[in-house]
Image (cartoon, helix red, strand yellow):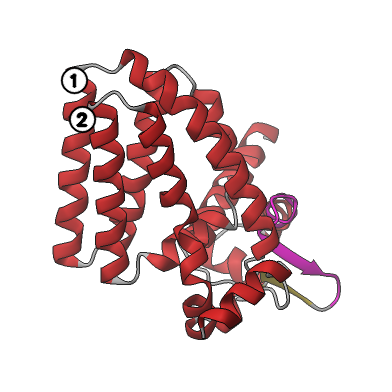
Amino acid sequence: MASTDSSVQSAVYSALRNNIMSLQLKPGATMSTQKIAEKLNVSRTPVREAFIRLQRDGLLDIFPQKETSVSRIDFSKLSQERFIRESLESANIELFIKKVTKADISELELNIEQQRATVQTCDYYSLFQLDNAFHEYMFNATGQKAAWEVIQKNSNHYARVRLITVWNKDIMMETILQHQKILSAIQEGSADYAKIYIKAHLHKLENQVQQLLESYPDYFVKDSIPPEEKFEVLLRQ
């Protein structure tokens, strides 16, 4: 019985987490154990346990006797998550270039072709998934799967912003172009250029801060932008 309860709780947790990370549940959206339990046809106990886990993940804000809501995106936490990813990506790309094969190149080329296909149908979420798969492939190829898991576990704010940005078709095209530059550097065996392109790819959000705040003000924690970035935004106006 305990095993069944545990599996139900895990299923509820996974379903809610996937909905939050895919933005089916938007930042700031309110939630209740009763409504979620009814929708999933389960008791409130596994939902409450899932809420607690999501709160630990930083994806839910729980205010006892008041409300529970999907956490808004915090730019200060996003910056920390990006630092982790950039550090691990830069280290891994050097390993990948040393052992890359023709088969690896073909797989990454195929991934980029699939990315281009998503633009035609404006399939934003598929592009987001292919973007992740592009980077994950290189971690798997070097045997650094644990590093990719660290990135995934520490991307609750960064990943949601990435998904918001690809709602724009021009940004979709820019994302694909950046992947092509990374692949070209890999083909040339240049770890230095590959790291430069990866850094540019991961920092592109800095140029989109003002647009995101204007388009989706309710999705972000107020006053969470670091002071230096606020000044940069003001200078661009």
Residue 69 in view (yes/no): yes
Q: Position of residue 235 (x, y in %)?
A: 57, 80
- The Cα atoms of the two marked residues, 2 and 1, are separated by 6 Å
Residue at disc 1, secondary structure: helix
Circle 2 SS class: helix
Amino acid type shown at disc 2? Glu
- 19 or 82: nearer the viewer: 82
2 and 1 marks in contact (CB < 8 Å):
yes
Q: Quick check: is 91 in the magenta stretch?
A: no
Q: Splitting the image into 4 quarters, where does residue 33 fall? A: bottom right
| Residue 74 picture location, percent across and down | 67, 65
Place residue 35 in its image quadrant. bottom right
Query: Quick one: label 2, few (<14), some, or many (20+) residues within 10 Å?
Result: some
Q: Which mark is residue 103?
A: 1
Q: Residue at x 57, y 35 (%)?
A: 87
Looking at the image, the residue that sits furthest to the top is: 99
Residue 148 visible here = no
Q: Residue at 70% across / 34% down in the picture?
A: 2
Q: Is residue 2 above or below residue 132?
A: above
61 falls in the magenta region: yes
The amino acid pointed to by label 1 is Ala
Tag on residue 138? none
Residue drawn 51% across the image and 80% down it: 236
Q: Is 95 or 107 nearer to us in this picture?
A: 95
Magenta range is 51-65
User: In the image, is residue 209 above or below residue 53?
Assistant: below
Q: Where is residue 6 in the image (x, y as percent from the top left)?
A: 65, 38
Q: Name the residue under label 2.
A: 107
Q: Is residue 127 above or below residue 88?
A: below
